[in-house]
Amino acid sequence: MRLRRMLAIWAARFAGFACKKMGRQGVTWAGKIALKLDPNILKTLAGQVRKGIFVTCGTNGKTTTNNMLCAALEKEGYKVVCNHTGSNMLNGVAAAFALAAGLGGTLDADYACIEVDEASTRRIFPHFKPDYMVLTNLFRDQLDRYGEIDITMNILEEVMQSAPDMKVIVNGDDALSAFLAMDSGNPYVTYGISEQVMDDKDPHEIREGRFCKKCGARLEYRFYHYSQLGDYACTGCDFKRPAIDFDATDVRVSDQLAFRVEDHPIAANYKGFYNVYNILAAYAAGRTAGLSMEHFNDMLKAFNPENGRMEQFRIKGCGIVLNLAKNPAGFNQNISAVMQDDTKKDLIIVINDNAQDGTDISWLWDVDFDRFRDANVNSITVSGIRCQDMRLRLKYVDIPSMLEADVETAIRKRVEDGCGNLYVLVNYTALFSTRNVLKKIEGEKA
């Protein structure tokens, strides 16, 4: 059996190397080959993790939170397995373990930090039972793939109950996530923000958690942070926002994010209020595992949120920010992050409708694009497979845009003719190819 496992690891490494040479990500192929050659490889290698396995689930923020947690554990001196690229289905998870293992077929790791697609948990949990689950939030996402949120919640509750000792680190400000953790029967701890930070009174924003999952009555909010995140209580039963174990206080949002938790100051050079939740989730997960997290701020100073999560590039004097925006809640927070920058800026919005994106792009009509009118925008270019749909959506809020279906051409034009400050917002399948384009242009000689 060990010989079979070694063969699977060698084959996975070769597949990953070959795909990278061809300019492809290659991670899922590596995992698929490893599982084909050794169906037990994931179970065996996961069993060799010495201290604990974290999985990160939720609609938005999984990749950033998971990678940040991995970096924090490494900063504390531990060896960690992680699917950094965000390949979060069964093949991607198998690849993370197989590519981290030695050629002799064994894994040298203290912890594993594994981002897991919610719908894929049913396929992954039979291979190993995590010690911890970080649950970031539950928003509407890809209706043609996930269905309504109730379906996702039912899947997650099922897998939680299949791992009854798994401790859940849950966003207590999200009524859907909090109810799920409470109802599952698993032990849980909460993180959240108990003071109002943002003035979020937009009546048009889609708020999924308006009704109590326990009794169906309307939830009453003392305040919102964004979407359905906030301080809530049911008007018909005793369900309410739980007591918060890891509470962010003195939150400041500008070009830098800062807050206090457990009376420790936390600071990071990131934009976007939503990143307070990502940072807080990673901190809470490490502390729940019993770690001091004394080097957490050092980690944040060095941490680069790669893979298109507020990733920064510099090309011919033009500053470029690449960020993923794949559903209404995420896109609205992207708009808020763009608006934090009050200088003049160009925008490129790339929308695809491949299978992994969800072929139903009606969610674009739930995004508050009209806010771009107040964002000091120099130009907006729409690109990608569904660029015409994106252009139509902007037309309905009287925002003019330029159309350039080819992403590389769109970027080159804005680098040459733009204002020197460019935001590129992409949905899921556009992310890897757009990042490759940016890296390619960045590497070219002037």
Image (tube, rainbow, N blue to C red):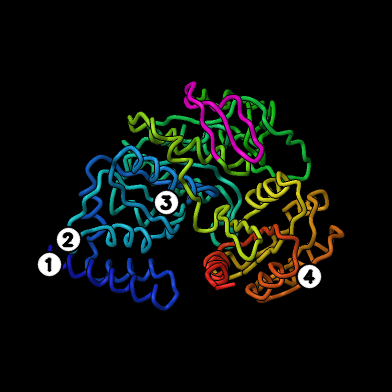
Tell me residue 203's x, y (percent): 78, 40
Which residue is at a point 69% across and 75% down the rendered structure image?
A: 405
| Dot label at residue 3 | 1
Q: Depth-wise, is mark 4 or mark 1 nearer the camera?
A: 4
Q: Are marks 3 and 2 in contact (CB under 8 Å)?
A: no
- The residues colored magenta run 245-268
Q: Are marks 2 and 1 in contact (CB under 8 Å)?
A: yes
Which residue is at a point 60% across and 56% down the rendered structure image?
A: 323
Q: Is residue 110 left or right of residue 212?
A: left
Is the magenta region chiefly helix, strand or loop?
A: strand
Tell me residue 220's x, y (percent): 69, 28
Query: What residue is disc 4 on?
Result: 402
Question: Which one is earlier in the sequence, the residue at label 3 or at label 1?
Answer: 1
Q: Depth-wise, is mark 4 or mark 2 nearer the camera?
A: 4
Position of the C terminus, as image quadrant, is bottom right
- Say which amino acid is labelled 2: Gly
- Say which amino acid is labelled 4: Met
Q: Residue furthest front?
A: 446
Q: Residue furthest bottom?
A: 22
- Say which amino acid is labelled 1: Leu
Is 424 rendered above or below residue 22? Answer: above
Which residue is at a point 56% across and 29% down the rendered structure image?
A: 259
- Crowd around label 2: few <14 · some 14–19 · many ≥20 (10 Å): many
Which residue is at a point 55% across and 73% down the rendered structure image?
A: 444
Choose top left, top right, bottom left or bottom right for residue 327: bottom right
Q: Are marks 4 and 2 in contact (CB under 8 Å)?
A: no
Residue 263 in view (yes/no): yes
| Dot label at residue 115 | 3
Query: Is-magenta flag for residue 284?
Result: no
Q: Depth-wise, is mark 3 or mark 2 nearer the camera?
A: 2
Query: What residue is disc 2 on?
Result: 105
Residue 287 in view (yes/no): no
